[in-house]
Image (cartoon, rainbow, N blue to C red):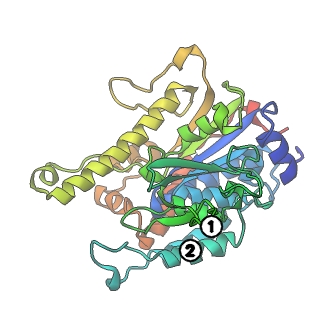
Amino acid sequence: MPVRPSRAQHLASNVADPNAGPKRILALDGGGLRGVLTLGMLREIETVLRARHGGDPDFRLCDYFDLIAGTSTGAIIAAALALGMSVDEVLERYRQLGNIVFKRSLLRWGALRAKYPADKVRDALTGIFDDRRLDSDDLRTGLLVVTKRLDTGSTWPLTNHPDSRYFNRGKHATTIANREYPLWQVVRASTAAPYFFDPETIRIGRGSDGAKPVTGDFVDGGVSPHNNPALQALMTATMPGYAFNWATGAERLLVVSVGTGKADAEVGHANLIEGTAAVHAVLSLKALMEDCADQVETMMQWLSTSPTAREIDREIGTCAGPLGGKALCSYLRYNVLMTSDWCARHLGEQIAKKALKALEAMDEPANIPELDRVGRLAGAKLVQPAHFDAAFDLR
């Protein structure tokens, strides 16, 4: 059985040392409570990798992956996994969080208030992450959380890499070092979905010469192009500006991407013709987010070699390539397409269209048991040990 490195060894070698390899990335989509689907598939990934590495009951996904990336609900799961929790432990915390946070109140009806109170999210997240910061010694592997700064319109990929540009700042610098950000607040920022929750305000500058400290208002990373953070994670790991500088290649870099369910794209002719301006706006925003998600999958399949590549559309197929004839990475994508035909073909089960439509809700705690069941089924059907090349085994 391979000897797992300590947290300090893992961060110093596999994460911070670009010459150590190979490297492995886990990327987790946003999607509200549909993150339970993600956990169902992650359970199978954890089981496969644990068996691959000797069956140690203490094996955790943070032992295998050198960077765990998450957007929105994926950020909650990513941070918990990076702290060394098992998938089952995360699910238990997740159930508690969902039932507390997404409790409806008649007092919050109306268009001018967020649907759910931020204090419940804050309490739930501090219950998981306590007073840890982005530089916490408890983080056993690399972590990437994607959020968006609303007041500047910029995407913020925040990592715990010790050499990233804003991770460390001098004692007299006016900019607060990223490493000082509370972990719960970074995750809360990534989960602040507009309409559902108010933005999260983070103090990012101390102020000087009597000036007020600088703050930023952050919203859900899903509002950026990176609700599926796989491409951002690949960029973070390989683009020089992000400090990781990991090597590329099909046997040097593995990206495993797990979704929260792809909604049925069909919206119905009546909705388009008879809908109000508000309905059209919501449908347009939903379509834009789906377009971004499809673009990320297209790019990832174009840049990689992948045994799980799906047909993007009838014109480009699976984007078989790869670009330039040389893959930047190996890529695995696991997700559930919420259509009856897909479920029958890939999961071996007939699930009614109406039932699948109900599961698309991002804020319905009553869906948790069925999301868990479908996620476990998807993991058992989709995740295959052969997908994980021996080149990436721990040594």
Q: Nearer the viewer, residue 379 or 268?
A: 268
Question: Which residue of the protein is positioned furthest toward the front in this rendering?
Answer: 209
Which percent across, then down, holds residue 99?
Answer: 49, 77
- Three-letter amino acid code of the residue under disc 2: Arg
Place of residue 386 in the rendered image (x, y in percent of width and height, measured from the top left): 66, 35
Q: Secondary structure at mark 2?
A: helix
Residue sitting at 80 percent across and 60 percent down? 137
Q: Secondary structure at mark 1?
A: helix
Q: Quadrant of the N terminus?
A: top right
**Picture quadrant where residue 225 is located:** top left
Instruction: Using residue 315 as the reference point, say whether residue 31 is left or right of it.
Output: right
Quickly name the residue at label 2.
122
Q: Nearer the viewer, residue 47 or 170?
A: 170
Alpha carbons under labels 1 and 2: distance apart: 7 Å
Query: Disc 1, disc 2: CB below 8 Å?
Result: yes
Which of the pair 213/177 is nearer the observer? 213
Sequence order check, earlier mark of 1 and 2: 2
Q: Residues within 10 Å of mark 1 (few under 14, many from 20)?
A: many
**Residue 216 against residue 310 in the figure, above or below:** below
Q: Which mark is residue 184?
A: 1
Q: Is residue 289 left or right of residue 179?
A: left
Q: Amino acid at mark 1?
A: Trp
- Residue 387 visible in this rendered orientation of the protein: no
* Quadrant of the rendered image containing residue 246: top right
Residue 224 shows in this picture? yes
How far from the left and from the top, in percent, is residue 271? 16, 54
